[in-house]
Amino acid sequence: MENEPRINFTIEDGSNVEGTRYNTSLWSFMGKAALYNHVYVAADDEFAIYVFQCMPEFATAARFALDNDFPLHMHIPEPSEEDVQAYENYIQSNLKDLNSFPPKEWIPDE
């Protein structure tokens, strides 16, 4: 187990989560549901992280999972309710940082 491939993720609070074959998997959905593609890392019994494909870390995490024979769940027709909720929570947390759209400087003076 010492030579097992590992990938580290730094989460929002600055702490690290280690992904291994035993707690990390790549999820890929078909068609419109591909929006929910993600790498899932179960850090412990009560905490997990999603790395969605819209996140900058996704490409590296997905490639690492593929190259190192991590569990793959491919071409699934639709995501679980938990996946959808996690994605919506992620998007909402990023939208709350926007004060207004479009920015005032984009609107021409009349």
Image: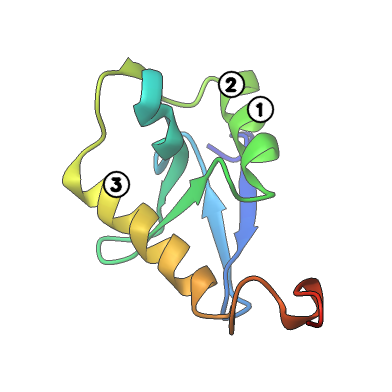
Residue under circle 2? 66
Residue 19 in view in this figure: yes
The label number, if any, that marks residue 83 in the structure image: 3
Residue 73 in view in this figure: no
Residue under circle 1? 63
At which x and y percent is residue 36? 40, 38
Relative to 34, say whether 18 is above or below: below
At which x and y percent is residue 33? 35, 29
**Callout 2: SS:** helix
The label number, if any, that marks residue 4 in the structure image: none
Answer with the quarter of the image where residue 92 lies: bottom left
Q: Mark 1 packing: few (<14 Cα in 10 Å), some, or many (20+)? A: few
Q: 104 or 32, which is in the foreground?
A: 104
Q: Residue at x 18, y 46 (%)?
A: 81
Label 3 or label 1, whichever lies nearer to me, is 3
Q: CA distance from mark 3 to mark 1?
A: 20 Å
Q: Mark 3 packing: few (<14 Cα in 10 Å), some, or many (20+)? A: some
Q: Residue at x 69, y 49 (%)?
A: 56
Task: Compare marks 3 and 1 and give the one earlier in the sequence.
Answer: 1
Left or right: residue 11 compared with residue 25? right
Relative to 97, say whether 75 is above or below: above
Relative to 8, say whether 72 is above or below: above
Asked if the residue at tag 2 contacts the one at tag 1, i.e. Cβ–Cβ closer than 8 Å, the answer is yes
Q: Residue furthest left?
A: 81
Q: Amino acid at mark 3?
A: Asp
Q: 24 or 73, which is in the foreground?
A: 73
Q: Amino acid at mark 1?
A: Arg
Asked if the residue at tag 3 contacts the one at tag 2, i.e. Cβ–Cβ closer than 8 Å, the answer is no
Q: CA distance from mark 1 to mark 2?
A: 5 Å
Label 2 or label 3, whichever lies nearer to me, is 3
Task: Compare marks 2 and 3 and give the one earlier in the sequence.
Answer: 2
